[in-house]
Amino acid sequence: MKDQKLRKKLIEVSLPLETMNRESAREKSIRHGHPSTLHLYWARRPLATARAILFSQLVDDPSSHPEKYPTEELLTNERRRLHGILERLVDWDNLNDTQLFEDARAEILASNGGVFPVVLDPFAGGGSIPLEAQRLGLESHASDLNPVAVLLNKSLIEFPPLFAGNTPIFPGAAV
């Protein structure tokens, strides 16, 4: 555990902010299949940003492993590789890329002793953080004082897994 505290995470050192900002802004115009179409919550956070922040705070920066990356060139190349994963993660069009999410989960596991951390968002609001934590394969818990926020979180992170993989009740109704 002591070693864990000394390691810097990617978020502390370097982030591809331009890509994160562009994709977070683009997300506001997505109207089909986006959770924001469920309810226009007053303080919804961009899912791309939540996904990027979760990933980058859970993955070690390569500078934390000088034994693996002894030269500046190796360090820069590894950071570029991690930025590549992060840049692909924030792109809404990649949400169904199972290999990308497997790669992200592998990086999280490698940086956390082979164990997925548990995420708790005690003021979850519109549910961006717990939803994206769940998407990254993490156990996610959310709460809020606002009953509308609680209902949104239930509909985003609790109910869908209960029905995932079931056949539709009336398949012809979906257009």
Image (cartoon, rainbow, N blue to C red):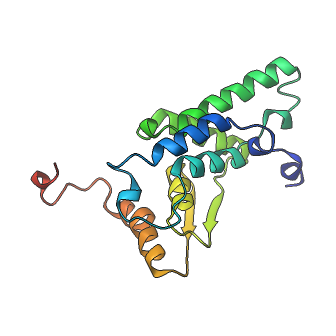
Residue 152 at x, y = what percent? Answer: 42, 69
Query: 28 or 105: nearer the eye?
Result: 28
From the viewer's perspective, is 19 left or right of 174? right
Q: Nearer the viewer, residue 124 or 9?
A: 124
Q: Is residue 69 above or below residue 32?
A: above
12 and 71: which one is in front? 12
Q: Quadrant of the N terminus?
A: bottom right
Of residue 10 and residue 35, the one placed in the foreground of this image is 35
- x, y (%) of residue 100? 51, 34
Residue at image position (29%, 53%) is: 165
In the picture as drawn, the residue positioned furthest to the top comes out as 73
The residue at 32%/48% (across/down) is: 32
**Residue 153 point in image, percent of width and height:** 46, 68
Q: Residue at x 83, y 44 (%)?
A: 8
Q: Which quadrant of the structure image shows residue 96? A: top left
Total residue callouts: 0
Q: Position of residue 40 (x, y in %)?
A: 41, 64
Q: What's the residue at 74%, 44% (across, down)? A: 11
Position above or below: 136 against 22:
below
Report whether 120 appears left or right of 40: right
Q: Quadrant of residue 141?
A: bottom right
Left or right: residue 24 compared with residue 97: right
